[in-house]
Image (tube, rainbow, N blue to C red):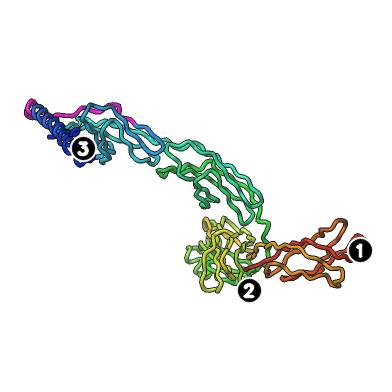
C-alpha cells in the first residue's frame, strides 16, 4: 500500500510537465518515488505481522483542538500527531451521529464564516492504514457578536444625511441596512447614506451591519435616530377633496351626526343582537362589560372610497387628512392607498397617509381598516379628505420692459406650464426702480417699471417664475 506522501509526490510529478520536457529525468524521479513506495509497503506489512491477532490499532488522539477567526473564515487548529496522518472533523456531539465536515492534512483547516450561534465539533486522526483515533476530541465555541454601531444624522430641509461608525465584528462586514419606520429604504456598502423625505413628520431611522455570513447587528439605542423632518419646500397644494362617506362600508355605519362609526355589526337586528349574545335584557349586556348598545362590536371593519381629481397628474404628493373621535376602547386604523388613471386598473401606492406617486394618475382609492383590540373598541371618523400637491417648476430669464407699453410689456415663459403660482422680477439698473407685474397666466406675464418719482421707464429686468407642469 502506498503512503499518502508518495501518492502526492507522484501527482505533483505528473502535473509538472517533466515527462514531456525531460522524459529521462522523469523516469529517474518516478523510480526513486517507487522505491520509497515499496519501502512503505514493506513497513506496513511488517507492522501488520507484528500486531497480535484480534488487537485493534488506533491512531493517536488529537490534542489542543481549538478555533480562531479571521475576517473571512472560521479556522480549526490542533497539535499534529505526526507525519503522514490526516484528520477528520465532524459537526455534532457524538462521533457516530455527527455530520462529516472535512478531511485535512497538517494542523489547521478553515471553514466558511458562520452565523452567530454555539457550535460543537469533533476531530480524530487517521493513520496510513485508515485507523482512527480511539477517542474523538471535542470543541465547543460561540461566534462573537457585533460591537456597537453609532448612527448620526443631519437634515437640510427634507434631505437627511446619515453616517455611522463601523462596529467591531468577527467577520468582514459586507453591507449595511437602513430602515425608516421599520421599512428598508437602502442597502449601503459605505458608511454614509442620503435620503429625501417627501412629507414632513417624525421618522425613526435605524442602521444595521451585515457580515459575509449573513449575521445582522442588533437594533440598539445607538443605531437608532428619531427626528422631525420638514416637508419639501417646492411642492404646492393645488386641490383638496373631502369625502361624504358614501363609499363602500363593511362593519361600518353612518350615524345621525353624519360620521362613520366603526367597527360595528350592521347585519344583526336588535332581537338577533340579544339572542346571539344570550342577553335577556339591556342590563345583561351592561353586566357583560358592554355599556353601549352597539357593543360588542364586529371587528375588523373597513371603508373604501375613491377621489377623482378631474385631470391627470404625475410626480405628485397625495396626503390623506382625517379626524377621529374615540367612543370607547382602542381602535387601530390601517391604510391602503391606490392610484389609477382610468378608475379600472389600480396600483398600490403604499400604506401611509402621505404618498408620492410618480406615474400618471387621476384617481386615488383609499381603504381604511378599523381593528378593535377588544369587543368595546368604537371610533367615529369625522372627516376624510385627500390633498394633491405638485412640485413647483422654476423658470427664469431676462427681458426689456418698455415705458411705452401701456399695459406693461408681455413676457413669455421659456417653459410650458399648466398653472402659474408666482412671478417676481428686479431691474439690473442702479437706483430705486420698482417692477410692477399687474397680471400673469400659464403662458406669459406683463411687467412695467417705475422710478423713484413714479415715472414709467424702460429697463432690463431679471425675472423668476414658479409654476406647475405635468409635462
In the rendered image, residue 68, in percent from the top left (x then y), is placed at 37, 32
Q: Is residue 225 magenta?
A: no
Q: Nearer the viewer, residue 266 or 100?
A: 100
Q: Say which element carries label 1.
A: loop
Task: Tell me the quarter of the image containing the N terminus.
Answer: top left
Can residue 291 be seen by looking at this rendering? no
* Residue highlighted by disc 3: 13
Residue that badge 1 annotates? 454
Please tell me which of labels 3 and 2 falls first in the chain.
Answer: 3
- Front-most of 166 and 139? 166
- Confirm whether residue 14 shows in the render: yes
- Of residues 449 and 423, the one nearer the viewer is 449
Contact flag, marks 3 and 2 (Cβ < 8 Å): no
Is 241 placed above or below 19 here?
A: below
**Whole-percent x and y of residue 179?**
53, 49
What residue do we see at 28% from left, 30% from top? Answer: 107
Q: Which residue is mark 2?
A: 310
User: Principal SS element in the magenta part?
Assistant: loop
Q: Which residues are magenta?
A: 48-66
Classify mark 2: helix, strand or loop. strand
Q: Is residue 215 left or right of residue 204?
A: left
Foreground pick, 47 / 117: 47
| Tags 2 and 1 touching, CB below 8 Å | no
Amino acid at each position: 500500500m502506498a503512503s499518502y506522501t508518495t501518492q502526492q509526490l507522484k501527482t505533483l510529478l505528473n502535473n509538472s510537465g517533466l515527462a514531456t520536457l525531460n522524459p529521462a529525468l522523469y523516469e529517474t524521479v518516478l523510480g526513486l518515488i517507487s522505491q520509497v513506495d515499496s519501502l512503505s509497503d514493506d513497513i506496513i506489512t511488517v507492522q501488520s505481522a507484528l500486531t497480535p491477532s484480534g488487537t485493534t490499532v488506533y491512531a493517536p488522539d488529537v490534542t489542543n483542538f481549538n478555533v480562531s477567526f479571521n475576517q473571512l473564515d472560521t479556522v480549526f487548529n490542533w497539535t499534529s500527531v505526526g507525519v503522514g496522518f490526516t484528520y477528520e472533523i465532524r459537526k455534532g456531539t457524538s462521533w457516530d451521529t455527527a455530520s462529516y465536515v472535512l478531511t485535512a492534512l497538517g494542523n489547521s483547516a478553515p471553514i466558511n464564516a458562520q452565523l452567530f450561534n454555539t457550535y460543537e465539533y469533533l476531530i480524530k486522526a487517521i493513520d496510513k492504514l485508515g485507523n482512527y483515533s480511539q477517542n474523538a476530541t471535542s470543541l465547543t465555541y460561540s461566534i462573537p457578536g457585533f460591537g456597537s454601531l453609532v448612527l448620526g444624522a443631519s437634515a437640510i430641509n427634507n434631505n437627511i444625511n446619515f453616517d455611522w461608525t463601523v462596529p467591531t465584528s468577527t467577520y468582514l462586514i459586507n453591507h449595511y441596512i437602513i430602515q425608516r419606520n421599520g421599512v428598508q429604504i437602502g442597502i449601503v456598502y459605505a458608511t454614509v447614506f442620503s435620503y429625501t423625505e417627501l412629507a414632513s413628520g417624525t421618522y425613526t431611522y435605524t442602521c444595521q451591519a451585515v457580515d459575509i455570513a449573513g449575521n445582522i447587528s442588533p437594533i440598539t439605542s445607538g443605531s437608532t435616530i428619531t427626528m422631525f423632518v420638514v416637508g419639501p419646500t417646492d411642492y404646492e397644494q393645488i386641490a383638496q377633496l373631502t369625502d361624504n362617506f358614501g363609499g363602500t362600508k363593511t362593519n361600518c355605519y353612518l350615524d345621525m351626526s353624519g360620521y362613520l362609526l366603526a367597527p360595528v355589526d350592521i347585519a344583526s337586528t336588535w332581537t338577533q343582537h340579544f339572542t346571539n349574545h344570550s342577553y335577556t335584557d339591556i342590563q345583561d349586556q351592561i353586566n357583560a362589560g358592554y355599556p353601549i348598545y352597539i357593543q360588542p362590536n364586529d371587528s375588523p371593519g373597513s371603508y373604501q372610497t375613491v377621489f377623482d381629481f378631474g385631470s391627470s397628474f404625475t410626480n405628485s404628493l397625495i396626503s390623506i387628512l382625517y379626524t377621529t373621535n374615540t367612543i370607547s376602547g382602542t381602535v387601530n386604523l390601517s391604510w391602503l392607498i391606490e392610484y389609477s388613471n382610468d378608475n379600472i386598473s389600480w396600483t398600490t401606492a403604499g400604506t401611509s397617509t402621505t404618498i408620492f406617486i410618480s406615474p400618471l394618475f387621476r384617481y386615488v382609492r383609499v381603504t381604511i381598516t378599523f381593528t378593535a383590540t377588544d369587543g368595546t373598541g368604537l371610533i367615529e371618523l369625522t372627516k376624510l379628505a385627500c390633498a394633491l400637491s405638485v412640485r413647483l417648476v422654476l423658470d427664469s430669464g431676462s427681458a426689456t420692459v418698455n415705458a411705452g407699453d401701456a399695459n406693461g410689456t408681455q413676457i413669455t415663459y421659456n417653459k410650458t406650464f399648466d398653472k402659474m403660482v408666482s412671478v417676481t422680477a428686479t431691474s439690473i439698473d442702479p437706483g430705486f426702480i420698482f417692477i410692477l407685474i399687474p397680471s400673469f397666466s400659464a403662458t406669459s406675464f406683463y411687467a412695467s417699471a417705475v422710478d423713484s418719482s413714479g415715472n414709467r421707464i424702460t429697463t432690463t429686468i431679471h425675472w423668476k417664475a414658479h409654476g406647475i407642469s405635468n409635462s
